[in-house]
Image (spheres, rainbow, N blue to C red):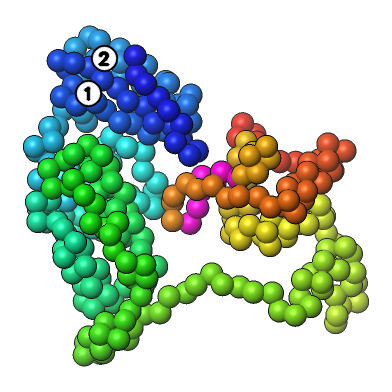
Amino acid sequence: MATKRKRGSSWEFIVRRRGILPKPLYLTFASEEEGDRYVRKLEALLDAGVVPEEFRQRRSELVTIEDAAREYLAVQQVPTSDKRCLAVVISRIGATRLSTINYDWAELWVTGLKRERNLSPSTIRHQVGALARCFDWGARRAISGLVVNPLRQLPKRYAIYNDSDASAVRVLKGHARTDVERDRRLHSGEELRIREILAGERPPGRERAFELRHQGALECLFELGLESGMRLREMYTLSKEQVDLSKRTVFLEKTKNGDKRQVPLTSVAIKAIQRYEKQVAQGKRPQWRSRSANTR
């Protein structure tokens, strides 16, 4: 029987078969139910002596970045954003041998993304992050050349253009790309005016107040945004199953970069959620989204 354990908001299953599999298989799934279904079918095949094609490749056959990335994509559940980034990485540096990858290589690759391709810091972080997660997978399985993941050793702000990067880019008649940080701050009195409008007051310059069809939901979103810093889409797409008030945590499954993460909830945020749940229980719409419900 496979062993399984919860890791954050996902589940990891470990499948072992002596004499059939050279090494344990580590599989990650979004839910326990999905993992149970997949592993049940996989173990039935293994019990019959059949090894699925995607698991037949031996570690010694993984020689290049492309080999490792394609194996990683075949056996792991990877966000669509990472798939797109890895496709770009494979097309550009896929022939790089894993045995040559070290910290110096990681630095040179990132420098090339800035000086030669003039990519934005955000794009650089996405490509490096996608390949880093692939290398994490390889390091956990001790794939030759990936015992240590050098991308995890890069310093903070590695994607930001320094003076040398900017000078090199100018030689090519380009310009240093700047980072667009999510650093929106409320101006003096802005929070009060927003709360007044949410409460039904008329905004300056308008004859009437806004018709807020879902006032309770808007108030809840506003409080969550202030208290957690989550993006609007992350809050709007929340399902009830992602909110654990007992642990004061929200589990985000669809972040901008494709990663899953946990967001701590403050007492103010918890009260806002509880207030909204009470409104829903009293028959006010819209209700919490449900995974089983049809959504637009």
Which mark is first along the chain, 2 or 1?
A: 2
Residue 33's x, y, as percent? 48, 24
Classify mark 1: residues with Cα within 10 Å, few (<14), some (14-19) or many (20+).
few
How many residues crowd around disc 2 within 10 Å: few (fewer than 14), some, or many (20 or more)? few
x and y, in percent, of residue 11 in the image: 43, 31
37 relative to 116 in the view: left or right: right
Q: Are marks 1 and 2 in contact (CB under 8 Å)?
A: yes
Asked if residue 256 is positioned above or below residue 185 in the image, the reply reads: above
Residue at image point 82% right, 73% down: 193
Could you tell whether 291 is left or right of 145 in the image?
right
Q: CA distance from mark 1 to mark 2?
A: 8 Å
Report whether residue 53 is seen.
no
Q: Can you identify the residue that label 1 sits on?
A: 52
Q: Position of residue 232 (x, y in %)?
A: 62, 58
Question: For mark 2, what is the residue?
Answer: 45
Foreground residue, 88 or 275? 275
Dot 1: element: loop
Q: Residue at x 50, y 38 (%)?
A: 9
**Would you place residue 26 above or below residue 47 in this image?**
below
- Which residues are the magenta region? 250-256
Vertical placement of 153 versus 169: above or below? above
Q: Is residue 180 left or right of residue 169?
A: right
- Quadrant location of residue 228? bottom right
State the SS at label 2.
helix
